[in-house]
Image (spheres, rainbow, N blue to C red):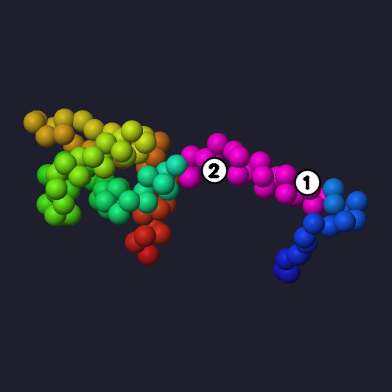
């Protein structure tokens, strides 16, 4: 199927169709779903945060496991976990004396789709 290419038509009949079509696209970009997806992708733009999420796709982890795998300072990992937690992507619970992190149920499906892209 060939795409129609139009740019700022001057014909009144065509112009109303053009404005309506672009209006739909504008509404999409101003919608809540687009804003939420943009916020999640911004959170994942830091490599450590993306690595954390990729590990959490497999199972729950404590900070010491991230520290071992990434070989980064513990405070840097904790800071980035806090950013992800504040953004609603991860939550924590205690197992014995260890604070364990997991993906939130609301964010997990979207993050699994991103994980599929990264792993392919």
Instruction: Please tell me whether the stretch drawn in magenta is mainly helix, strand or loop.
Output: helix
Q: Earlier in the sequence, mark 1 or mark 2?
A: 1
Q: Name which residue lies at 26% across and 42% down.
A: 80
**What is the quadrant of residue 105 in the picture?**
top left
Q: Is 112 located above or below residue 36 in the figure?
A: below
Q: Name which residue lies at 41% across and 46% down.
A: 42
- Say few, some or many: other residues with alpha carbon within 10 Å of mark 1 (under 14 / 14 to 19 / 20 or more): few
| Residue corresponding to mark 2 | 34
Residue 92 x, y percent position in the rendering: 24, 33
The one nearer the camera, 40 or 72, is 72
**Circle 2 — which element?**
helix
Q: Name which residue lies at 75% across and 49% down.
A: 21
**Circle 1 — which element?**
helix
Q: Name which residue lies at 80% across and 52% down.
A: 18
Is 51 positioned to the left or the right of 66 in the image?
A: right
Q: Which quadrant of the rendered structure holds the C terminus?
A: bottom left
Asked whether residue 112 is drawn in magenta, I would say no
């Amino acid at each position: 199927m060939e795409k129609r290419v139009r740019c700022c038509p001057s014909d009144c009949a065509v112009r109303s169709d053009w404005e309506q079509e672009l209006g739909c696209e504008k509404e999409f970009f101003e919608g809540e779903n687009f804003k939420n997806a943009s916020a999640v992708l911004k959170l994942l733009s830091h490599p450590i945060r993306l690595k954390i999420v990729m590990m959490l796709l497999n199972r729950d982890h404590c900070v010491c496991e991230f520290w071992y795998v990434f070989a980064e300072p513990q405070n840097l990992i904790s800071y980035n976990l806090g950013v992800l937690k504040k953004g609603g992507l991860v939550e924590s619970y205690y197992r014995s004396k260890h604070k364990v992190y997991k993906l939130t149920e609301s964010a997990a499906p979207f993050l699994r789709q991103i994980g599929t892209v990264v792993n392919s």
